[in-house]
Amino acid sequence: MRIVLVGSGYVGLVSGACFAEFGIDVTCVDRDAAKIASLEAGVMPIYEPGLEDLVSRNVRAGRLAFSGDLPAAVAAASAVFIAVGTPTRRGDGHADLTYVFAAAREIAASLRGYTVIVTKSTVPVGTGRKVAAIIAEARPDLAEGRDFDVVSNPEFLREGSAITDFMHPDRVVIGLTDGSEAARAVMRELYRPLFLRDTPILFTGIETAELIKYAANSFLATKISFINEIADLCEKLGANVQEVATGIGLDGRIGKKFLHPGPGFGGSCFPKDCLALVRIGREAQSPLSIVEAVVSFNDARKRQMAERIIAACGGSVAGKRIALLGLTFKPNTDDMRESPSLVVVPLLREAGAEVVACDPEGIAEAKKLLPSITYAESASAAAEGADALVLLTEWNQFRALDWAEMKRRMRGHVVVDLRNIYRPDQMTAAGFAYHSIGRPS
């Protein structure tokens, strides 16, 4: 079987490489000629642990190729996955489907023989039907159900662990239009290795599959915001949020994941998916007040982190040097999208602080978005002459710092840990004025 991934960004590239690892012939297509050239040269456009080796191995095996020629690739494919971006549309918060619909039109012109068109991008409910309509309009000679079918197959990949998530998923969701048996057979064959491992494969209607992705991400975002609110309450009451999280997470109905307090969620999925689901609810005249509250709280949460840092520095950071550890929205990625640092850093700069930051993988992208700060190659270099040190992203490199050396390098002694990765007693014993989230000092 031969398949095509339209879009060679995060979702398309990881999914294409993983399908190739399953033994399927895969072509990743992209309009960006420079990206295709880089991929053919073995240079990854993103940082994802294990991806470079996975891509290299399957290219050498002849199962994975890259191309800018969409018509040729699609004409030979049994299934074509649309894996293009769906960014938040300015003004109304809805997902921008410009790239999805453009891809559908290009695919339609190139179809030869029965083909399954799969929306892998995160798209609002009803998009699959619109894609089918676009194809039918562009190619009146084709009939849905006979010459093509449209399927929703949302991705659930976490940056930093995407390959494991694809190879060993909690579930695979496949939404079919009108229960097409031909499309079901193609998708079953594509995911055959997972069927053999007894991975739950959920076949639904196409609208249901589209909604599952938004509902899942919004629920996880709600858990994050909930524990952040509980952390604030813990600080007022003298309780320990980590112990609270452990206590409630042991309840099997709740679970322990996504109960880690911090500076708010970011990334390419949770923020835009929550906004899109809010918009979907409003358009359906079924407002999602809980999700709306999560969006508002998370925006405010990031601003509050800057206020916490300023308060820890005695109420003013004017003329002070702040060492910032971590810039990406989470560890093990170079993704800066919606990262708390994009809110915290400008607010610190507006308050008069000099910011020196380091990040193991995110500096190249950060320099485009935060050009007014200084960048350091290591935590110790960032700490040189700093009045305060702030842990913003919990990279493993920052978990076992030599605090005696850090103290010698720093001018001040304030440490603000926004991820709760250090022990308060140890930090106090090391001579720091230590501040964390939702824990007694």
Image (cartoon, rainbow, N blue to C red):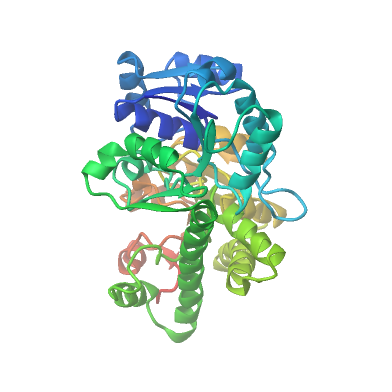
Which image quadrant for residue 104?
top right
Q: In this view, does 405 lie to the left or right of 299?
A: left
- Looking at the image, is 439 positioned above or below residue 6? below
Can residue 341 be seen by looking at this rendering? yes
For this orientation, the residue located farthest to the bottom is: 237
Considering only vertical position in the picture, is 302 above or below 377?
A: below
Name which quarter of the figure residue 21 lies in: top left
Counting labels gives 0
Residue 402: give x, y in percent of width and height.
32, 49
Q: Residue at x 47, y 77 (%)?
A: 230
Residue furthest right in the image: 91
Q: Is 264 or 65 nearer to us in this picture?
A: 65
Residue 39 rendering spot, x and y as whole percentages: 47, 19
Please tell me whether residue 206 is drawn above or below residue 64 in the rendered image: below
Q: In this view, does 136 lie to the left or right of 242?
A: right
Q: In which quarter of the image is residue 436?
A: bottom left
Q: Quadrant of the N terminus?
A: top left
Q: Is residue 319 visible?
A: no
Q: Which of 214 and 440 is in front in this view?
A: 214
The C terminus: image quadrant: bottom left
The residue drawn where x is 42% and y is 45% is: 157
Residue 170, position as x, y percentages in the image: 32, 53
Give how far across and how far down residue 295 sits, in percent. Answer: 61, 64
Q: Which residue is drawn at 28% across and 38% down?
A: 192
